[in-house]
Image (spheres, rainbow, N blue to C red):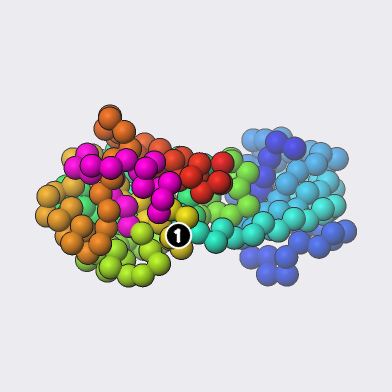
Amino acid sequence: MANLYYRDGLDTGFVVGATVEISGDEARHAVRVARLRVGEHTLIGDGRGALAKGEVVAVDRDRFTVRVNEVTVAAEPTQQLVLLQALAKGDRDERAVEQATEFGVDSIVPWQAARSVSRWDGAGGAEKRAKGVAKWARIAREAAKQSMRAFIPEVRQPMTLGELCEAAAGSGTSVVVLHPRGEDRLSEWAASHAAGAARIMLVVGPEGGFEDSELDALEAAGATVLVLGNTVLRTSSAGPAALGVLNAALGRW
């Protein structure tokens, strides 16, 4: 069973013995690109934890139907891993979204750092933000499908530095800033602190790095500045690498 397809808007859930129709872009890709055929078995999900295995019983140009044979519902993680990804030039922030989804992130939040080359503010900012969030959400959905995830990570509205500081000052949330200024390694911190946090927010800067004032503000609010190791990673890979460390520490991997 090599493929997973998501079915949006299914409020009643999957029921063994019932048939479920997939249409739209999802079905067109399955039928025209993946060459899904009647009689094949595939996996369908709602993106919210439910997965159903079944047999394809009908195929058209832009839709297909699956008869459900088995249903599983994954429990939502009790600890939330959140990536705060700074806007970056080119497709580096989008690559971070894709890889973070493959690495099991629970939600993703864009933030515009002082040194972000890509900007979602200024003239037409509201439209840029809406388009940017929608694009990141599409990337996360496709990456979740590729990695056979029961949950599609939510891409939330952008946060400001002030909102990040408020999160760092709150209870139950550990805000971790990845930057060479840190003296301790994430792996060391995770061994003693990760298990006790209801939510861990990983903050990654843009290609030009953080400004000192941003780091000062976050540290003053209660955030912890840590390093991954002896080398400095790109903005596209720092978040996914950190997620790998936390996955191991929390027993997800």
Identify the residue shown where x is 81% and y is 48%: 54
Which sits in the foreground, 229 or 138? Answer: 229
Residue 183 shown in magenta: yes
> On the rendered structure, is 59 left or right of 190?
right
**Position of residue 78 measured from the top left corner of the image (x, y, whole percent):** 55, 61
Q: Quadrant of the N terminus?
A: top right
> On the rendered structure, is 234 left or right of 104?
left
- Can residue 107 be seen? no
Please provide the residue range marked out in magenta. Answer: 175-193
Quadrant housing residue 41: top right
Q: Residues within 10 Å of mark 1 (few under 14, many from 20)?
A: few
Identify the residue shown where x is 25% and y is 62%: 222
Name the residue type under label 1.
Gly
Residue 172 shown in magenta: no
Residue 133 against residue 249 in the figure, above or below? below
Q: Quadrant of the C terminus?
A: top right
**Position of residue 89 measured from the top left corner of the image (x, y, whole percent):** 26, 41
Which sits in the foreground, 202 or 117? Answer: 202
- Can residue 115 be seen? yes
> On the rendered structure, is 8 left or right of 21?
left
Give the residue at mark 1: 196
Outermost residue toward the left in this view: 213
Quadrant housing residue 182: top left
Residue 158 against residue 228 in the figure, above or below? below
Q: Secondary structure at mark 1?
A: helix
